[in-house]
Amino acid sequence: MTSIAKRVLTAVVALPLLFCLVVFLPQMNHAALMVVILAASVFGTVEMASMVSKKVSVSRIAYAAPLITLGEYISRYFYNSQVYSFYLFTILLAVILAREVFSKEDDFSSRIAECGADVLVLAYPGLLSIFIVDLLFLNNSSYHILLYFALVFGCDTFAYFSGMLFGKGNRGIIKVSPNKSVAGFIGGALVPALIGGSATLLFPDAFTFTFAEGFVIGALVSIFGELGDLVESTFKRSAGIKDSGFIIPGRGGILDSIDSLLFAAPVFILSLRFFDAI
């Protein structure tokens, strides 16, 4: 089966399942979807630690990063606050840094690099995933979650096919991902912008932003989504691997599928707040 066929098959299975989770199981602020997010955080942390460990050793403490994801849901659901997940991140960070004080080794030359590696694993995807969790607690959350996924997946899909159709002579600008093209970038940004603008026309009771504001929101989400994809490509190139894992047919690992979601989520929420749309 070709790579494109695998991608299509995965989308045919995954997208309807995701839709059903959001629409038919919204109980407890989308607890069912939260299980999926937490699982992605767990597997994503393992993949990230595996990549980083090819260059620098990673401590076991860094594998606790999914607790930050879970802490965000608990903090939001029970205390209506985002503070506690950041406290948890800070505590884990302090433990990682403080453990070097009790090291029995005489050579400390690699300690800065090792601490930096642990912090990176904590933050990606653990810390970044809390913004995806925050989507579960927005007003009209089901509509906003579906819009967010439509923007990010629309960006990924149209960037891919725009690049295939029109990107033959304009690839190679981004060295870390030479197959990316200008045509793919434009297609990946324009279509989500139109989706964002059209959302308020199609569902005026759910979205309070204007067409122009929705257009901007869609464009920003797509730009940062594509940036997230490039950042993960940088990590993979540094580790000398093609995919972060193999768990998802046609796409590779979990990080290969959520890299755009991680970068775009805070931009989506911040944009909605900027336009006073939530």
Image (spheres, rainbow, N blue to C red):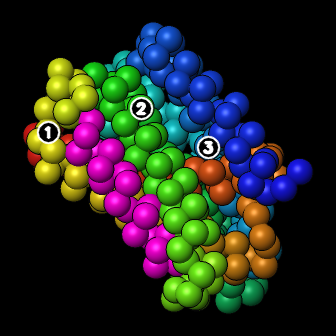
Q: Is residue 216 magenta?
A: no
Residue picked out by circle 3: 41
Residue picked out by circle 1: 209
Image quadrant occupied by the C terminus: top left
- In terms of depth relative to the viewer, which is nearer, 114 or 248? 248
Residue range corresponding to the magenta coloring? 181-199
Residue depicted at x 14% and y 39% = 209
| Looking at the image, residue 26 lies above or below residue 68 | above
- In terms of depth relative to the viewer, which is nearer, 78 or 212? 212
- Where disc 1 sits, the SS reads loop
Q: Are marks 2 and 1 in contact (CB under 8 Å)?
A: no
Residue picked out by circle 2: 146
- Where disc 2 sits, the SS reads helix
Residue at the extreme right of the image, as rendered: 1
CA separation in Å, label 3 and label 2 = 20 Å
Residue depicted at x 48% and y 34% = 71
Please identify the dominant SS of the magenta region. helix
Q: Amino acid at mark 2?
A: Leu
Image coordinates of residue 126 in percent, x first then y, are 54, 49
- In terms of depth relative to the viewer, which is nearer, 161 or 29? 161
Q: Is residue 188 magenta?
A: yes
Q: Amino acid at mark 3?
A: Ser
| Looking at the image, residue 213 lies above or below residue 242 | above
Residue depicted at x 59% and y 33% = 15
Q: Are marks 3 and 1 in contact (CB under 8 Å)?
A: no
Image coordinates of residue 156 in percent, x first then y, are 53, 56
* Quadrant of residue 207 within the rendered picture: top left
| Looking at the image, residue 250 lies above or below residue 233 | above
Q: Amino acid at mark 1?
A: Phe
* Quadrant of residue 117 within the rendered picture: bottom right
- Where disc 3 sits, the SS reads helix
- Ranked by sequence position, the earlier of labels 2 and 1 is 2
